[in-house]
């Protein structure tokens, strides 16, 4: 019995020693596998972050390219900022160096982004494994032909584009852009809402996410005035030396209205096709008067040359198809001091053409939609201010009218999509 007991004890001790040896040998392997899984999970997560950063940066770069009128030197900087901000806002505690490369290619017009980052392993270092390089690639292609519907030219002031109270701005398949570098370059406050294919501010914006669709892009490159080379119409002399006041139905002829034009009471006035110059005086439509035009373009120059469409008026206007005002409804002289052009009419639903006020302020304060029945309307002004309950609708149905779209308006701010 002693012999048997001794043999069993010896076998048990031998077996226990073998298990201990196996366990001792297996624990490092198990630790290696566990630590490797932790490192792998972190690297996989960071790879996902980098891919999202590359996607966002490619889209931002392509949109910036389409908005900046093909100024390609700005794209790489836009991409670098977007990637850096995205990674900064999503990184874990142990990220390494970050490198970004941008390529712009033609035919088709694309922006490709490559992002690489060195990821230090924590447990891997215990087993001689160094940093792991993680990469991501994305390409965004500019497609289609939407356009610019609103451009605020002012480069420094806050609220270059401002919406207040319940005002709405609806850009249909087109882009809204503010040149101001101010932190509040674009404002949409209270119950107001700005909707467009794309909204872009050289500076920043003020407003909740519910005030925009989509949220504006910020730090966009400057956008040059696409009509800056458009010559101003001739405005010497006077067809009418004194202000013209109309209180009954009439058809008017083109000319230089020194002192301005006033349409009052219930007069229905039709402007014959051609150039109308408001020199040193305004165009004012008040009371319950009605103003119609089919091919009339209005040029404002001199002191006090501004616009007022009062609340109870009816306005139906279509820009000229040829001549110096081709495609332009209103054009204010670049030599003028800042004037305010007021659309207060609750029945100004047909405004076909481009409103061009390079030094002017456009104020829209109505209870009803404005320009919503127009085939297309575009606005280029120093500042634009919507207040009250208007809905300024900027359509881009160019094929529904023979009014020409000025060069630089059409085909700017094209749609962008990721292209795999």
Image (cartoon, helix red, strand yellow):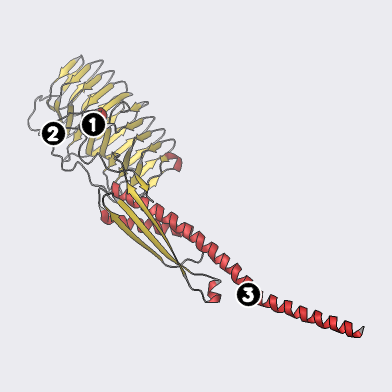
Q: Does 32 appear above or below 181? A: below
Q: Which mark is residue 18?
A: none
Which residue shows up at 22% across the image and 44% down it? 225
Residue corresponding to mark 3:
28
Q: Secondary structure at mark 1?
A: strand
Q: Position of residue 132 (x, y in %)?
A: 47, 68
Quarter containing the N terminus: bottom right
Q: Pinpoint residue 363: horizontal percent, then vertical percent.
A: 30, 33
Q: Is residue 275 above or below residue 63?
A: above
Q: Nearer the viewer, residue 380 or 395?
A: 395
Q: Which residue is mark 1?
A: 353
Q: Residues within 10 Å of mark 3 (few under 14, many from 20)?
A: few
Q: Is residue 125 visible?
A: yes
Q: Give the residue at x 39% y 57%.
A: 137
Bin the neighbour count of mark 2 within 10 Å (Cα to Cα): few under 14, some 14-19, many 20 and up: some
Between label 1 and label 3, give the one nearer the viewer: 3
1 and 3 marks in contact (CB < 8 Å): no
Structural distance between the alpha carbons of marks 2 and 3: 84 Å
Left or right, 320 with reference to 80: left
Tell which tag, 2 or 3, sits nearer the viewer: 3
- The residue lying toward the viewer, choosing from 379 and 100, is 100
Q: Residue at x 34, y 35 (%)?
A: 172
Residue topped by disc 2? 324
Q: Secondary structure at mark 3?
A: helix
Quick one: label 1, few (<14), some, or many (20+) residues within 10 Å?
A: many
SS at badge 2: loop
Q: Does 33 sit left or right of 379 as displayed?
A: right
Q: Position of residue 276 (x, y in %)?
A: 15, 27
Q: Give the image quarter of residue 271.
A: top left
Q: Position of residue 311 (x, y in %)?
A: 32, 23
Q: CA distance from mark 1 to mark 2?
A: 14 Å
């Amino acid at each position: 019995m002693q012999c048997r007991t001794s043999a069993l004890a010896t076998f048990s001790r031998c077996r226990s020693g073998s298990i201990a040896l196996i366990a001792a040998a297996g624990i490092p392997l198990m630790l290696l596998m566990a630590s490797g899984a932790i490192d792998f999970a972190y690297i996989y997560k960071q790879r996902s972050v980098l891919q999202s950063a590359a996607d966002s940066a490619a889209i931002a770069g392509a949109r910036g390219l389409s908005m900046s009128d093909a100024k390609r030197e700005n794209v790489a900087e836009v991409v670098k900022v977007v990637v850096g901000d995205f990674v900064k806002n999503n990184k874990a505690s142990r990220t390494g160096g970050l490198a970004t490369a941008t390529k712009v290619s033609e035919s088709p017009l694309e922006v490709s982004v490559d992002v690489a980052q060195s990821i230090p392993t924590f447990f891997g270092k215990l087993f001689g494994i160094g940093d792991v390089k993680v990469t991501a690639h994305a390409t965004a292609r500019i497609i289609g032909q939407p356009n610019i519907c609103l451009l605020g030219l002012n480069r420094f002031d806050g609220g270059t584009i401002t919406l207040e109270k319940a005002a709405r701005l609806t850009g249909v398949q087109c882009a809204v852009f503010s040149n101001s570098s101010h932190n509040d370059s674009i404002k949409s406050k209270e119950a107001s809402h700005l909707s467009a294919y794309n909204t872009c501010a050289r500076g920043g914006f003020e407003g909740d996410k519910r005030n925009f669709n989509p949220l504006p892009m910020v730090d966009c490159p400057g956008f040059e005035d696409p009509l800056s080379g458009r010559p101003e119409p001739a405005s010497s002399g006077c067809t009418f030396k004194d202000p013209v006041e109309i209180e009954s139905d009439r058809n008017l002829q083109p000319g230089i209205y020194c002192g301005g034009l006033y349409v009052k009471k219930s007069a229905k006035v039709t402007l014959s096709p051609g150039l109308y110059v408001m020199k040193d005086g305004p165009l004012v439509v008040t009371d319950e008067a009605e103003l119609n035009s089919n091919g009339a373009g209005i040029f404002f120059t001199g002191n006090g040359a501004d616009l007022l469409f009062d609340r109870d008026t009816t306005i139906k206007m279509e820009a000229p198809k040829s001549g110096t005002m081709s495609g332009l409804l209103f054009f204010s002289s670049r030599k003028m001091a800042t004037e305010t052009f007021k659309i207060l009419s609750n029945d100004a639903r047909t405004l076909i053409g481009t409103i061009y006020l390079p030094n002017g302020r456009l104020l829209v304060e109505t209870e009803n939609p404005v320009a919503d029945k127009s085939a297309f309307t575009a606005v280029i002004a120093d500042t634009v201010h919507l207040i009250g309950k208007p809905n300024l609708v900027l359509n881009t149905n160019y094929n529904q009218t023979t009014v020409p779209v000025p060069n630089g308006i059409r085909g700017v701010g094209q749609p962008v999509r990721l292209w795999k």
